[in-house]
Structure formats: C-alpha cells, structure tokens
Amino acid sequence: MPGGAKFMAGVQHRFALDGLTIRHNREAHSVRGARAEVQSNGFGLTRRSYLIITGPGFSWSARIDSVTIGKATGFAAKVNVAAAGLAD
C-alpha cells in the first residue's frame, strides 16, 4: 500500500495522500480512478502552473509557483502511482 504524502499550494490549498484516500482541505475521496498532473501555460513572467487532480466525482486545481513546481510534480506522481495500484 502506498505511503502518505502532502503538498501545500499557498495557504488555501492543502493536499494529502494517505493510503487509499486523497484529500483537498476537508474534502476527501478514494484515490481509485484519480489522476494528477502539473500543467503550465504562458512564457517568461506570464507563465502560470497548476496542480490538477481529478477523479470520480471530484476535480481540484490549485495555482502553484515556480518554487514549488518540483514538489507539486512529485506529489502528482505519488497520486498516480497510488491510483495505478488500485486499477482494475
């Protein structure tokens, strides 16, 4: 079973992966069927990056800064590994 992981995007977005559950602030769902990715658009100073997590019955996104993009990418990978472990 996958271990836990946490990621914070600013003060408003707290994500946590704990075993079979993924959380965004106080909302929690099964990680089964979830998919996470980091998307970026724009160039130079106008570049914006987002952590996007979707699954059955939920869709979350949070803007992330250039300092935390590596941590967000690592968190997304852990979510995807946990979800893949539950795939039918």
Image (cartoon, rainbow, N blue to C red):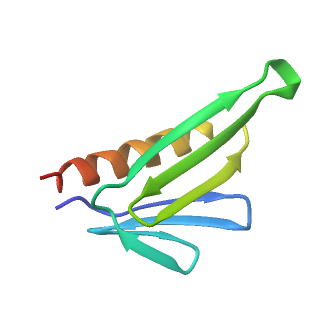
Number of numbered callouts drawn: 0
Residue at the top extreme, as displayed: 43
Residue at 55% x, 48% y is 52
Quadrant that contains the N terminus: bottom left
Location of residue 70 (image quadrant): top right
Q: Looking at this view, is 20 or 34 the one in front?
A: 34
Residue 57: horizontal and vertical position, in percent?
Answer: 44, 67
Going by the image, does 83 lie left or right of 7? left
In the image, taking residue 30 as reference, residue 8 lies left or right, namely: right
Report the side of 42 relative to 26 (left or right). Answer: right
Relative horizontal placement of residue 44, taking residue 17 as reference (left or right): right
Asked if residue 5 is positioned above or below residue 44 in the image, the reply reads below
Residue projecting furthest to the bottom: 26
Seen in the picture, residue 85 relative to 58 is either above or below; the reply is above
Return the residue found at the far right: 45
Identified at 66% across, 53% down, the residue is 62
Residue at the image point whose x is 47% and y is 54% from the top: 54
Give the residue displayed 74% in from the left and 66% down from the top. Answer: 11
Above-or-below relation of 50 to 34: above
Counting from the top left corner in percent of width and height, residue 85 is at 17, 52
Q: Quadrant of residue 45 in the image?
A: top right
Q: Position of residue 3 (x, y in %)?
A: 27, 61
Which quarter of the picture shows residue 46?
top right
Residue furthest front as drawn: 57
